[in-house]
Image (tube, rainbow, N blue to C red):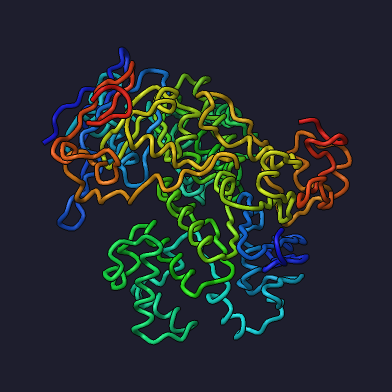
Amino acid sequence: MMQPVSQPVSDDPLLRVENLVVEYPVGNKTVHAVSGVSLDIARGETLGLVGESGCGKSTLGRAVLQLRRPVSGKVLFDGQDLTEMQGDTLRRIRRRVQLIFQDPIASLNPRRRIGDIIAEPLVISGVRDAKKREQLVHDVLGAVGLDPQLVIGRLPHEFSGGQCQRICIARALVLNPEFIICDEPVSALDVSIRAQILNLLEEMKARYGLTLLFIAHDLAVVKAVSDRVAVMYLGRLCEVGPSEQLFAQPAHPYTALLIEAIPVPDPDVRPAESVAVGEPPSPIAPPSGCRFRTRCPRADQRCSDEVPELREVAPGQFVACHHPLIGAA
Amino acid sequence: MTGPALLSVEGVSVNLPTPRGNLRAVDRVDLSVGAGRTLGIVGESGCGKTMLSRAILQLLPKKAMLSGRVMFDGQDLVRLDRERLRKLRGRSLAVVFQDPMTSLNPVLTIGTQLIETLQEHLELDGQAAKLRSIELLTAVGIPAPEQRLMQYPHQLSGGMRQRVAIAIALSCEPKLLIADEPTTALDVTIQAQILDLLAREQRRRHMAMIIITHDLGVVAGRTDEVAVMYAGRVVERAPTHDLFKRMRMPYTEALLAAIPKIDAKPHTPLPAISGRPPDPTRPLKGCSFSPRCRYAWAQCQIEKPRLEDADSPGHQYACFRPLNTVAGVPA
């Protein structure tokens, strides 16, 4: 069913996802959450992954970590295929890959002290020396801008959302991972706190030499931190490209629509009147051909007959569209 | 401001007793909205914007203590008895909440909920109410409205549910619609549609509207006036254009600067606001924003600035070190 898609290939990818398919059973139906996604993330790169709720972006993140086993496809982390790994082998690899979630308060055990929460990954990965653990916990708390002395003995409810997200980031960093999947890490935070956390992620990326997959629905947030951006719609990639280029010159009508829909905090910029028509169809019965065609102003017969494949329309910019906004069709 | 105010909030304070002491959620707020006008109330979580809207609607928690006046259409809502309040709410005073799933009854069909509202407030008979419901659902952009009447809220998407909630709110031709974070739970493309819908219906019905949001982007192109709240107080209030182009309050400036800009280069550090809002049970003596304010000086920590008039009409701010003024900080 899935034809291989041409994909942006990086010379030295830390993560390579090939033709990943993830499906969930719902009653006697199937949710087509991710339908043949391929992408590369280069070492030291931040790839932003955007899309609206239900587009499969979080499922993709979880499938990378094998928290949700894909139906088919490969996930190559540093050359090793995670989809073929089980048990201990997988657990060892997962030390190098960490996850940060949207709701920082819900992702911390309310009954455990912060010091223990952050030391837990160290305990699990076999750091037996309590002194060493303590030292590592202290260091990482300091790095995320919290005072270890004031923090380690306290419980999560004593902290605000922004501080809890700092704690979650500290927990993700304590094992010194190479790769972090950030799943909507600032969506639950207030504007003033959001900026602090985004800046912190950037700092941590530089300090720990991280590679990031940054999943979010807010394009402006994604642009602020990403080298490249991938746009996802109903389980498929629409477009991948360098951040600035993609925003300046979107090739996919869906990317253009997302950009136009962002409310601009400037009263002189008139809100574009109803650029977006309709709502995303159900991933249980996605449209044939191009999945965006039911909302696309450029759609024609070909779009319902033929699945558009990702192809390069500008250097580094790939689009899956029969009628892209740039480059000849 | 054109014409007399439809709603005027006068010196409203809301105090909530908590185990940690008194929490002053809203602190002496004055606001007004004229017929057919849109007011945006902007602030971060915990700033009191939702409590203020509850105070206007008289839907505060039981323990809350409210002082001040809420004049709506010539009567003080604070002094109105429950029966008359109930008649007013839903009829001339309507509200749309953030999460349409909590404002719709999950065990009743869309039709029942719409028709019930119409029969209750407008005393329409069943058939007339049904026809009216279909009209309303069509107006808010719901395809196949006849079928939707038979469906339950869980069968609709978040965007569709919010459209239904708006249809119910609009059903009795309210004079004032309060939209409390109406699009926060929705995706960005749906958000644009819902905001357009609200703006269109407002113009058509010449209704007054209050949009409560944490997102300055939402109010920029869609309101006549904006009030910025911080720690329970209105710290700046101005015609929308003035607020964005000639802001006086450092908090407003910081809030705007902290939003990632779509035209900024990737990896540009964001001007974040350091620290976090003060504990509302431990009010500060001076300006509540002073611990986070880059311009604060000694006076800001000792004395609370009052909301004062700027030199442009309708513009007020509460700051000793206002931006864009001779006495204050050069912009």
Q: From the image, which quarter does the C terminus of chain B lie in? A: top right
Which residue is painted at 45% across and 50% down in the image?
B191
Viewer-closest of B313 and A200: B313
- Where residue B137 appears, as percent x and y from the top left, is 37, 67
- Indicate whether A41 appears above or below A221: above
Which residue is painted at 53% across and 75% down in the image?
B90
B271 vs B133, left or right, is right
Q: Would you say residue A179 is visible in this rendering? A: no
- Where residue A54 appears, as percent x and y from the top left, is 32, 47
- Indicate whether B245 appears above or below A209: below
Which residue is painted at 64% across and 54% down in the image?
B41
A135 vs B33, left or right, is left
Viewer-closest of B44 and B306: B306
Viewer-closest of B125 and B188: B125
A225 vs A83, left or right, is right
A263 vs A182, left or right, is right
Q: How many marks?
A: 0
Q: From the image, which quarter does the N terminus of chain B lie in? A: bottom right
Viewer-closest of A102 and A326: A326
- Where residue A78 appears, as percent x and y from the top left, is 30, 19
- Indicate whether B313 appears above or below B78: above
Which residue is painted at 37% across and 60% down in the image?
B141
- Where residue B287 appears, as percent x and y from the top left, is 80, 47
